[in-house]
Image (tube, grey):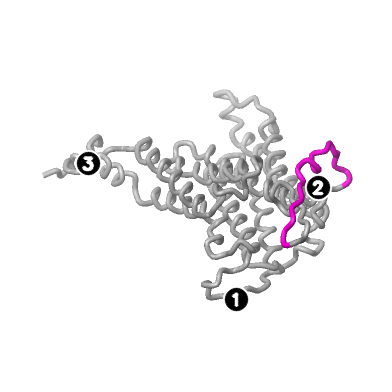
Amino acid sequence: MKTLTPWIQNIYKTGTHDYGIAIFVILVTLLPFIHEFFIGEDGTLLPWVPFEERKIFNYSMVGVFLFYFLIQVKALIGLWFWKFHLINKRHEKYLWVPIIAAIYHMVILFLSARSTIWNNALIKLIGISMILIVVGLWDYRSELAYRQKNKRAFELFGGSNKRVVGLNEILWWIGMLALSCMLFVHDFMTYGNGKAMDWLPDFGFVEAMTHKTIVDGETVTWVWEFGSYRILIYTFMIYLYLFFCWLGPFISGKGRSYRPIIIVPVALSLLQLVLIISRQSESGLNNPDIRLWITLGCALLAATVFLYKYKHLVIDSPQTNVNET
């Protein structure tokens, strides 16, 4: 083993499990825009793709369907990572709320039920609130049972003086509600035709964000490079949703060797938010080729941290000095 370089020794000691997770996270990061490599600017399939363009799951174009579907898959995987990091911890159960909400939206998508009552924003808000109440009661009863079970130990050695339901639990409740609602908050703010609802206070922002251009002799209205105010809000909120779905596992993954890799999907989601706010969504920075290189660059940087920050060199381990002959 002495002949191995420190770099190779580090790879040897880290193990294939952590590398598999790191590679998986990088591949998941590519999901929201990988379809752009075989979808044209008009949203239809490129000529070389061996499939016919057709309506799919009530979406007019395959590209639109793939964008919504893959972005929700990426978010759901991030939520599962988050839940895995909090396993056997009190707040783990709260993550069932956004997980169920994400699965529900995917079911609605595959059942082509977007125009039914089951996709109504108020119905979904009531459903999420009911799930939160159930999870809150579950958490409350679990904490009471835990304290009752360990009552004797608390009396002898001193127990927690915290309330059964404290500020942390309230913040988790509000946070999971807000996270779950990010998928359909645009329904409370805009009409189906894309215009802002009347109840929203108008300080001139919508008019300031709107501009018109002439395309093929027709006047087209744009809202910050998006076709409508509704599309702008939905796109911004979906990337904000993605950002938090992966920021959670990054924060909760403290001590795990693959944690630096999780910053890659966090950084890509943040980049998309910055591009939207800076009105650069149609710039070269949002080109799929550029985003691929940015992803690979972030992955390379994170991999360097991954290999060096958590290294356990074989030459420093007493166990590896056995059988060196």
**Residue assigned mark 1:** 52
Between residue 273 and residue 262, name the one nearer to us.
Answer: 273
Between residue 118 and residue 294, name the one nearer to us.
Answer: 294
How would you rate the neighbour count of disc 3 (Cα within 10 Å): few for under 14, some for 14-19, many for 20 or more?
Answer: few
User: Tag 3's secondary structure?
Assistant: loop
Image quadrant for the C terminus? top left
| Residue extending farthest right | 198
Check disc 1 and give the amino acid type: Glu
| Residue extending farthest front | 217
How far apart are labels 1 and 3 at the CA level?
52 Å
Q: Position of residue 58 (x, y in %)?
A: 72, 69
Circles 2 and 1 in contact, beta carbons < 8 Å:
no
Q: Earlier in the sequence, mark 1 or mark 3?
A: 3
Check disc 2 and give the amino acid type: Met
Q: Is residue 242 above or below residue 205?
A: below
Q: Position of residue 99 (x, y in %)?
A: 64, 52
**Residue assigned mark 2:** 189
How would you rate the neighbour count of disc 1 (Cα within 10 Å): few for under 14, some for 14-19, many for 20 or more?
Answer: few
How would you rate the neighbour count of disc 2 (Cα within 10 Å): few for under 14, some for 14-19, many for 20 or more?
Answer: some
Check disc 3 and give the amino acid type: Thr
Horizontal side, residue 219 vs residue 304: left or right: right
Q: Position of residue 118 (x, y in %)?
A: 78, 61
Circles 2 and 3 in contact, beta carbons < 8 Å:
no
How far apart are labels 2 and 1 at the CA level?
36 Å
Please give the range of residues in magenta: 198-216
Horizontal side, residue 175 vs residue 117: left or right: left
Q: Which mark is residue 5?
A: 3
